Image (spheres, rainbow, N blue to C red):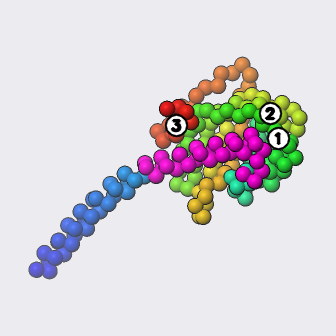
Amino acid sequence: MRRCVVHTRSVALVLLLATAVPLRLAAAPQHKRETREQVVALEQQWRQAELGNDVPAMDKLLSDDYLGITGTGEVLTKAQQLDHMRLRQIVITSLDLSDIKVKVIGHIAIVNSLAKLEGSVDGHSMDGSYRYTRVYQHLPGGMWKITSFEATRILGGKKAQEIPAATDKAESPGSK
């Protein structure tokens, strides 16, 4: 009789695992899609903060250990980025984002995009197209924060090519 009970428990455990694993795997794509949607919404908040020179909004978006590399190669901490905005050293008058791709890896989201912008840095024009990478980190409190940024200017005369499609990409706003 004991052998029958052990066998029955083993079969029950195998059946439980066989149904639980597919359910967890099925939930993963849904979670990644929701995360990508959240990150794309944060990209739009970042865009609005840049265009509106909204220092408090940018302060909420950037992590305390933020490091950014501008299109001119300047490395900025969070405090420096916010100071540039307060002092109007960076002024963006037009900012169009396209070709947004989001890759989610655990508590990290990596965004690659094309930005066409008009504006100035320290009074010098920075009009043009840029490819950028922004890294978001999901913090223990549940918030996503920008922890890293890098922009590369697309040189004149070169065609801005699309980033190759990834299997877990987010749709660009307005692409549907």
Foreground: 3 or 124? Answer: 124
Residue 10 highlighted magenta (yes or no): no
Amino acid type, residue under disc 1 in the picture: Ile
**What distance separates the C-alpha of mark 2 from that of mark 1?**
8 Å
Q: Position of residue 86 (x, y in %)?
A: 84, 49
Residue placed at 71% from the left, 34% from the top? 95
The label shown at residue 45 is: none
Most frequent secondary structure within the magenta stretch? helix
- Earlier in the chain: of badge 3 and badge 2, it is 2
Which residue is the extreme one toward the left?
Answer: 1
- Say few, some or many: other residues with alpha carbon within 10 Å of mark 2 (under 14 / 14 to 19 / 20 or more): some
The label shown at residue 171 is: 3
Are the residues tagged 2 and 1 within 8 Å (C-beta)?
yes
Residue placed at 29% from the left, 62% from the top? 17
The label shown at residue 119 is: 2
Residue placed at 72% from the left, 51% from the top? 57
Q: Position of residue 155 (x, y in %)?
A: 73, 25
Disc 1 element = strand
Amino acid type, residue under disc 3 in the picture: Glu
Number of numbered labels in the structure image: 3
Residue 37 visible, this angle? yes
Magenta residues?
A: 29-57
Q: Is residue 27 left or right of residue 84?
A: left
User: Which of the 4 quarters of the picture holds residue 141?
Assistant: bottom right
Q: Which residue is mark 1?
A: 90
- Earlier in the chain: of badge 1 and badge 3, it is 1
